[in-house]
């Protein structure tokens, strides 16, 4: 069943790419400029919606064990409602950040909860279509890989939870790390613990972080990314 769902999603990817190509006038100018800058530097710009469809296509040739692992994603609902993605971990955020992290070969992936715009609760077993993916990620943001120190990554997380009481769009949806925070602590000092993989965050170590060009350019207050180096 999952293999059939993946094949259906793969067939929808052509429609997704066609829609993206025809939506150029709707994409932000910063996205086009950033894409050209990356290409001029010999780097590849990756549309986040295409990342997900590409990951789905790869699953069609995966082993049965990989299919079983992927099916775990579908064991629960996918909730992209505003309050969910802006106040805590969301399965839809896990799904897309995990795809982005693997596609770019990163240690960690971080996307802003406000970037998810589907605002819908999809029950377990729902087949995601190309239209669903575009509904969730309508802005045409470019996926980028940047290196950050542990201290800079922690600062990014602090920014992400700094306005959680207002349900701000900056709330971080992440992959590859776990963190805890105290929402009652002062903004800027809320994150209590961070682990990357199974190790505590090292403030001086450098980590490969997958994110969007919007956040890299300081969107939603993510100034910490401006200190990183684009890979």
Image: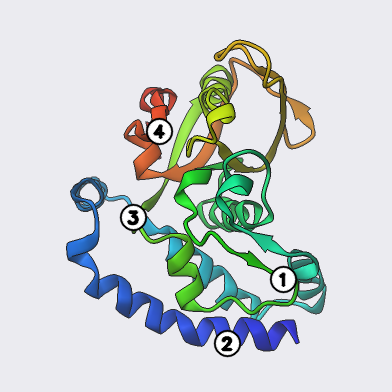
Which residue lies under the disc numbered 3? 45
Does the CB distance between marks 1 and 4 fall below 8 Å? no
Does the CB distance between marks 3 and 4 fall below 8 Å? no
Q: Secondary structure at mark 1?
A: loop
Q: Secondary structure at mark 2?
A: helix
Q: CA distance from mark 1 to mark 2?
A: 18 Å
Q: Position of residue 149 (x, y in %)?
A: 53, 22
From where the camera sits, is residue 49 visible?
yes
Q: CA distance from mark 2 to mark 3?
A: 25 Å
Which residue: 66% across, 12% down? 185
Which residue lies under the disc numbered 2? 8
Which residue lies under the disc numbered 4? 220
Which residue lies under the disc numbered 1? 123
Q: Which mark is residue 225?
A: none
> From the viewer's perspective, is the residue at label 2 or at label 3 nearer?
2
Q: CA distance from mark 3 to mark 1?
A: 33 Å
């Amino acid at each position: 069943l999952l293999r059939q769902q993946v094949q259906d999603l793969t067939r929808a990817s052509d429609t997704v790419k066609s829609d993206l190509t025809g939506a150029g006038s709707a994409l932000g100018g910063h996205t086009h400029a950033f894409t050209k800058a990356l290409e001029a530097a010999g780097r590849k710009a990756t549309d986040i919606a295409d990342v997900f469809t590409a990951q789905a296509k790869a699953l069609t040739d995966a082993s049965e064990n990989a299919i079983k692992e992927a099916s775990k994603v579908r064991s629960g609902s996918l909730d992209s409602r505003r309050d969910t993605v802006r106040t805590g971990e969301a399965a839809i955020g896990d799904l897309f950040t995990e795809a982005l992290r693997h596609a770019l070969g990163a240690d960690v992936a971080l996307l802003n909860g406000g970037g998810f715009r589907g605002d819908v609760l999809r029950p377990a077993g729902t087949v995601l279509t190309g239209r669903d993916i575009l509904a969730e990620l309508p802005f045409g943001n470019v996926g980028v890989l940047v290196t950050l120190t542990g201290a800079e990554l922690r600062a990014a997380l602090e920014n992400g939870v700094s306005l959680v009481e207002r349900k701000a769009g900056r709330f971080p949806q992440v992959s590859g790390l776990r963190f805890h925070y105290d929402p009652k602590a002062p903004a800027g000092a809320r994150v209590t613990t961070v682990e990357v993989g199974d190790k505590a965050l090292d403030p001086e170590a450098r980590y490969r972080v997958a994110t969007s060009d919007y956040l890299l350019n300081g969107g939603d207050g993510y100034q910490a990314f401006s200190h990183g180096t684009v890979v």
